[in-house]
Image (tube, rainbow, N blue to C red):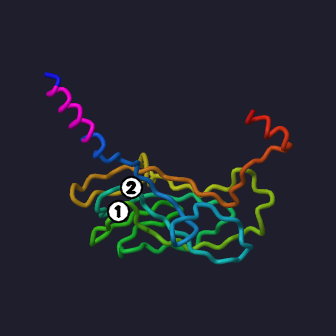
Amino acid sequence: MRKVLLTFAIVFTIAIANTAVAQTPYFQLYFDEGLQEASADCPGPGVLDTLYIAAHNFDMWISAVEFQVDYPVQLTWLGDAAVGSDLVIGQTPTGVAVSYQIPRPCFPSTVLMQVTVMWSCDDCVGIPAPGAEVVINEWPGEVSPQAVNWQTEVAIDGVGMTSLVCAQVPVEDTSWGKIKSLYH
């Protein structure tokens, strides 16, 4: 009996170790093409820039997406360009639906849109912490931003993430003595 229990325990442990942990699918706006910068400082008024909206962790082929983006006053929206699609309904500030004739792989991330904006701020002075927010929201009337699974035609909810203009981390005035006292 002990051998059976030991064998079961070993097989169970190996099965758990090999099971992939599902990650939450989400949409994020980036300030760089490499999808690394989710925050940026104001470069100055009148500067044209391209932002990138990507879907992450959907782990499927997607045939459509729908979402909406709230832009802060520091960014003036000028236009959208869907990546890999000719069928676009709407615009990111009011709600956009994008359909793909050829499904897009979303393992683990895919750039969906390029957004052209014009910066309308001089610097980060006067922008309260944590910063001005660029938020990806649900398509109007839906519960969350969504991507459609190409094989099952089921809409999968994602999380709309927040990017920051002039991200600021509040800092408290202190002394080295107070900091050192935290570690004693």
From the viewer's perspective, is 42 left or right of 101?
right
**Quarter assignment of residue 180:** top right
Within 10 angstroms of label 1, few (less than 14), some, or many (20 or more) residues?
A: many
Q: Residue at x 44, y 53 (%)?
A: 26
Please tell me whether residue 126 is drawn above or below residue 81 in the rendered image: above
**Quarter assignment of residue 48:** bottom right
Q: Residue at x 27, y 37 (%)?
A: 13
From the viewer's perspective, is 160 left or right of 16?
right
Q: Is residue 10 magenta?
A: yes
Within 10 angstroms of label 2, few (less than 14), some, or many (20 or more) residues?
A: some
Q: Is residue 130 magenta?
A: no
**Quarter assignment of residue 75:** bottom right
Q: Position of residue 99 (x, y in %)?
A: 33, 67
Residue tagged 2 = 57
Q: Residue at x 38, y 66 (%)?
A: 98
Q: Main secondary structure of the magenta part?
A: helix
Please tell me whether residue 2 is drawn above or below residue 19 in the rendered image: above
From the viewer's perspective, is 182 left or right of 21?
right
Residue nearest the observer in this picture, 139 or 150: 150
Q: Position of residue 46 (x, y in %)?
A: 71, 77
Residue nearest the observer in this picture, 60 or 95: 60
Quadrant in which the C terminus appears? top right
Q: CA distance from mark 2 to mark 1?
A: 7 Å
Q: Which amino acid type is marked by label 2? A: Asn
Q: Position of residue 162 (x, y in %)?
A: 56, 54
Magenta span of residues: 3-14
Please tell me whether residue 155 is drawn above or below residue 98 in the rendered image: above
Residue tagged 1 = 106
Where disc 2 sits, the SS reads loop
